[in-house]
Image: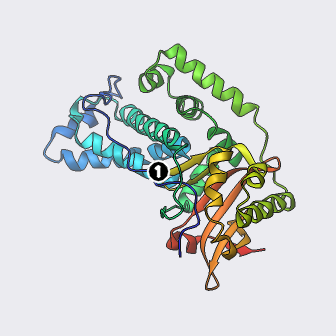
Amino acid sequence: MGDFEFPEKNGPVENEPEGNEPQGNEPEGNGTEENEIGTESGGEFLAARFESHRPRLRAVAHRMLGSAAEADDAVQEAWFRLSRTDAERVENLGGWLTTVVGRVCLDMLRSRTSRAEEPLEADAPVPATAPGPEQDALLADSVGSALLVVLETLTPAERLAFVLHDLFAVPFEEIASIVGRTPTAARQLASRARRRVQGAPAPDADLVRQRVVADAFLAAVREGDFDALVKVLDPDVVARSEGAVTAGAAAVAKGATGFAHYARFARPALVDGATGIALIVDGRPERTLAFTFVGDRIAVIDIVTDPEKVALLDVRLV
């Protein structure tokens, strides 16, 4: 049976042109550890140094992208770029890697934006991911669902400036080099993002109200009712799965109407405690949609299609 999801699959992020990677000019201590990279055991040492930075890099990427799988892809890309670089020239390895991850994430966010209005194909399977315990703990550490919803509404440059500066204290001078603007412009990007974050409404925590909206969404999908879908979706709604995002109420509603013939298998459910929908086949959940709400509308739809990942979710029919 076909998949019940809306976004199209994104391809892997393309590498930046050679020579566009940061070279790292700021010293970190006396540079002794980094100089050992040039020894015979330099490859193993470099890998060990990279692993020591991995938790921070993953945290940066996760907050930038909102997806554990995409965050891991961004961190892996940073390792590939480091392995192709003359690492002896990198004095501040942590800063260099943060800059690389920031650029990779910026490219991925811009790629999402460029694909947001592409037509959706109901028959195109899209794998998705469910964050594991480590990723959930990481996200809960400093980013709640309210912030994630607002971050999805920012431009890629605003999101990068806000996350790097406000959450990770990266100087605006370094952020400017990533976004290709002046430090003053980078400061303005973060300021605009901060105002939107501070003024954002909190997600609705009323499960009864959420269920009414979710049931209306499911009924509209079953009927293929585009207008009814738009009414329950936030204008800036985001539907996402691994490496794929569809943004905007019209685009998401258009994609959802293409799955009316599968909706008869869908049932109201709690997905890891969140109001959502589960596609039930042979008595077991095969696909899930988990909703985040702002007011009486759906603001984010997180879609899991991979059977192994669905099996790890706590899915309770209601």
In the depicted view, which residue is nearer to us: 210 or 231? 231
Q: Which residue is drawn at 19% across and 44% down?
A: 42
Whether residue 128 appears in this view of the structure is yes
Residue type marked 1? Glu
Q: Residue at x 29, y 40 (%)?
A: 81
Residue 172 to residue 136: above or below:
above
Rendered location of residue 20, percent (x, y): 30, 28
Question: Callout 1 environment at 10 Å: few (<14), some (14 to 19), or many (20+)?
Answer: many
Whether residue 314 appears in this view of the structure is no
Q: In this view, does 275 lie to the left or right of 37?
A: right
In the depicted view, which residue is nearer to us: 199 or 24? 199
In the depicted view, which residue is nearer to us: 126 or 24? 126
Going by the picture, which residue comes out furthest to the left? 40
Rendered location of residue 288, percent (x, y): 63, 67
Rendered location of residue 190, percent (x, y): 60, 25
Q: Residue at x 77, y 65 (%)?
A: 219
Rendered location of residue 6, percent (x, y): 58, 57
Q: Quadrant of residue 146?
A: top right
Describe the element under mark 1 as helix, strand or loop: helix
Q: Is residue 197 left or right of residue 177?
A: right
List the residue tagged with mark 1. Answer: 70
Q: Is residue 269 left or right of residue 38?
A: right
Going by the picture, which residue comes out furthest to the bottom? 282
